[in-house]
C-alpha cells in the first residue's frame, strides 16, 4: 500500500501539512458514470463526470461503511440532477458533499494541488526548484523556498525574492497556476527569471530546467564530548526517503558513530510504505504497524531482519509529527528500539488513498485506520514520548525563524537527546585498538575484560 502526506508544495493552502498520514496512491483508470440503479446518463464532457467519479470512489472505498449516517446513494441523485456551468461549480459541489462524511482527511484536490502533491510524494520534480506563493493583497508572486541543489538554489535565488517576469512576461496579472505552468517545461530547456530582492534591487537569472530529486533526509556527524552522534533529520516520507535514509545510516556508520538521533519534528508524514521501509532500517524484529479497512480486514507489517544498525537511537517528535512519523516513532518506541523525546505527536490514525480524476484533479479518501504494535488507537491522541520536554514560546519562535539552530546546543530537545544517549552509550578505550569503540551498555560485559574505559 503506497501513501502520501505532507503540505502541498506551492500554496499558502497547506491544508495537508501535519495531518494527512500514510496514503495510498492509485489511479482511477475506468471511471463509472452511472450505476445500475440509476437512469442518469452523463456525457463525457459534462462536469458531472467528475462529480460521479468522486461519488463512485467514496462509495467503494470510504472507511466508514455507514458514510457517517449519510444516505450516500441518495446523495448521488442529488448531485447529478444539478446542472454545473463549469468545473469550478462541480468542484464546489464535490467539496460540499465530502463534508457530509465528517472526515477532514477525505478531500478534493484541484488539478494544481494534485500535481504538486504528486511531485511531492514521488520525491522528485522537473523544473528549476522554486516554490511560489501569491500575496493576494498585492497580487505579487514570491519565492517561499528553493529546493536544495536545484538550479534555482545554485543561482542564489532565496526565500522572499519577488518574481517580476518569466521569459520577459510580467507576472503582475498571472495566477499562481499560470506562473507555475510558465516555469515548468521540458528538461534541458532554459528559462529567464527577473526577480527583486530587498537591499539588492532587480536582478536577472537564466536557469536550465532539470529533473530534481527532493532531499527528504539531511544528516551530519556531531562530536559531543566523547560521543560521536549521527544526527539525521527526516522532513517527509517520499518515495525516495527510504533510500536516502539508508545512505545516511551507512555513511554515518562508516564514521563510527556512537549512536543516532532521528529528528521527526515537524514531519507531517508521507507514504505508508516509506514509513515501513524506514522502520525496517532501524528495527531487526517486531511489528511495525497494523491497518484495518472498512470490512474489518487487517494487515500486519513486520520488520524483516534487514536493519542496518543496533546502536542506541533517540527519536525527536513534537505536535507537528504526524501520520507516517507517528507510525515510525510508535514502532521504534513500542519495540524498545528507541527512546522518544519531545511532546505528544499530532494524532492521526487513518490512511488515505489518493486517486487521479479524469480532468487532472484528485481525490484523497480515508480507506483504513492504523494502529501501532500495542494496538492503541492514537487518533486525536498521538504518540506520547518517553521523555517529555516542551519548548518555551520564545525558543519555539527562535527555532522556527532559524531552522539551522535545530540539532544544536540552542535546541533544548536535542540537548536532552544527547543526555539520553550518554546513558545508553559508553565510549571506551581498549588496549591495542587504534580507533575508539562505542558499545551499548548491555553489551559491555561481553567485551570489556578490564576496567580501562572512559565514561560516566
Image (cartoon, helix red, strand yellow):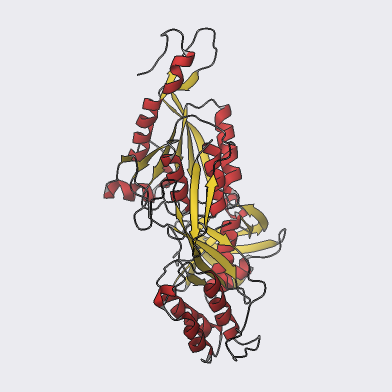
Determine the residue positioned at 52% across, 49% down: 300
Q: Quadrant of the N terminus?
A: bottom right
- Measured from the top left, where is residue 110 in percent x and y? 54, 73
Nearest the viewer among 37 and 261 is: 37
Nearest the viewer among 94 and 120 is: 94
Nearest the viewer among 363 and 150 is: 363
Give left or right: position of 49 versus 418.
Answer: right
- Measured from the top left, where is residue 159 in percent x and y? 48, 56
- Measured from the top left, where is residue 27 in percent x and y? 63, 67
Q: Is residue 53 above or below residue 277?
A: below
Determine the residue positioned at 58% across, 56% down: 2
Q: Is residue 187 above or below residue 72?
A: above
**Count of numbered tags:** 0
Determine the residue positioned at 55% across, 76% down: 54
Q: Is residue 397 above or below residue 79?
A: above
- Measured from the top left, where is residue 371 in percent x and y? 44, 52
Q: Residue furthest front?
A: 296
Report if residue 112 is visible in the image: yes
Q: Quadrant of the C terminus?
A: top left
Give left or right: position of 159 versus 118.
Answer: left
Q: Is residue 9 above or below residue 151?
A: below
Nearest the viewer among 155 and 348 is: 348
Report if residue 268 is visible in the image: no
Amino acid at each position: 500500500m503506497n501513501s502520501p502526506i505532507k503540505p502541498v508544495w506551492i500554496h499558502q493552502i497547506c491544508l495537508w501539512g501535519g495531518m494527512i498520514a500514510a496514503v495510498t496512491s492509485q489511479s482511477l483508470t475506468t471511471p463509472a458514470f452511472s450505476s445500475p440503479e440509476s437512469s442518469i446518463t452523463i456525457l463525457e464532457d459534462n462536469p458531472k463526470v467528475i462529480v460521479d467519479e468522486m461519488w463512485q470512489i467514496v462509495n467503494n472505498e470510504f472507511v466508514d461503511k455507514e458514510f457517517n449516517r449519510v444516505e450516500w446513494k441518495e446523495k448521488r441523485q442529488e448531485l447529478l440532477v444539478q446542472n454545473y456551468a463549469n468545473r469550478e461549480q462541480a468542484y464546489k459541489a464535490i467539496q460540499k458533499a465530502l463534508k457530509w462524511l465528517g472526515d477532514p482527511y477525505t478531500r478534493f484536490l484541484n488539478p494544481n494541488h494534485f500535481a504538486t502533491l504528486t511531485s511531492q510524494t514521488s520525491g522528485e520534480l522537473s523544473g528549476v526548484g522554486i516554490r511560489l506563493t501569491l500575496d493576494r493583497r498585492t497580487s505579487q508572486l514570491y519565492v517561499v523556498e528553493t529546493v536544495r541543489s536545484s538550479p534555482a538554489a545554485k543561482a542564489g535565488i532565496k526565500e522572499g525574492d519577488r518574481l517580476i517576469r518569466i521569459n520577459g512576461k510580467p507576472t503582475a496579472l498571472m495566477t499562481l497556476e499560470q506562473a507555475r505552468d510558465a516555469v515548468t517545461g521540458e528538461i534541458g530547456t532554459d528559462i529567464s527569471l527577473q526577480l527583486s530582492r530587498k537591499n539588492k534591487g532587480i536582478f536577472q537569472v537564466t536557469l536550465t530546467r532539470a529533473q530534481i530529486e527532493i532531499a527528504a533526509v539531511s544528516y551530519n556527524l556531531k562530536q559531543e564530548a566523547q560521543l560521536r552522534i549521527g544526527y539525521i533529520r527526516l522532513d517527509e516520507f517520499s518515495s525516495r526517503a527510504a533510500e536516502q535514509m539508508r545512505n545516511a545510516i551507512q555513511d554515518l556508520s562508516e564514521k563510527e558513530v556512537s549512536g543516532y538521533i532521528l529528528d521527526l519534528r515537524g514531519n507531517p508524514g508521507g507514504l505508508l510504505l516509506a514509513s515501513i521501509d524506514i522502520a525496517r532500517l532501524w528495527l531487526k524484529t517486531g511489528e511495525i504497524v497494523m491497518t484495518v479497512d472498512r470490512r474489518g480486514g487487517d494487515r500486519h507489517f513486520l520488520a524483516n531482519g534487514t536493519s542496518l544498525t543496533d546502536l542506541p537511537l533517540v527519536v525527536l517528535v513534537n505536535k507537528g509529527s504526524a501520520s507516517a512519523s507517528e507510525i515510525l516513532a510508535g514502532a521504534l518506541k513500542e519495540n524498545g528500539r528507541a527512546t522518544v523525546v519531545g511532546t505528544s505527536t499530532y494524532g492521526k490514525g487513518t490512511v488515505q488513498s489518493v486517486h487521479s480524476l479524469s480532468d487532472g484533479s484528485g481525490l484523497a479518501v480515508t480507506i483504513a485506520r492504523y494502529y501501532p504494535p500495542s494496538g492503541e488507537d492514537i487518533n486525536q491522541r498521538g504518540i506520547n514520548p518517553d521523555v517529555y520536554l516542551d519548548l518555551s514560546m520564545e525558543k519555539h519562535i527562535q527555532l522556527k525563524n532559524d531552522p539551522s539552530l535545530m540539532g544544536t546546543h540552542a535546541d533544548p530537545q536535542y540537548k536532552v537527546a544527547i543526555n539520553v544517549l550518554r546513558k545508553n552509550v559508553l565510549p571506551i578505550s581498549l588496549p591495542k585498538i587504534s580507533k575508539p569503540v562505542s558499545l551499548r551498555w548491555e553489551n559491555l560485559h561481553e567485551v570489556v575484560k578490564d576496567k580501562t574505559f572512559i565514561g560516566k
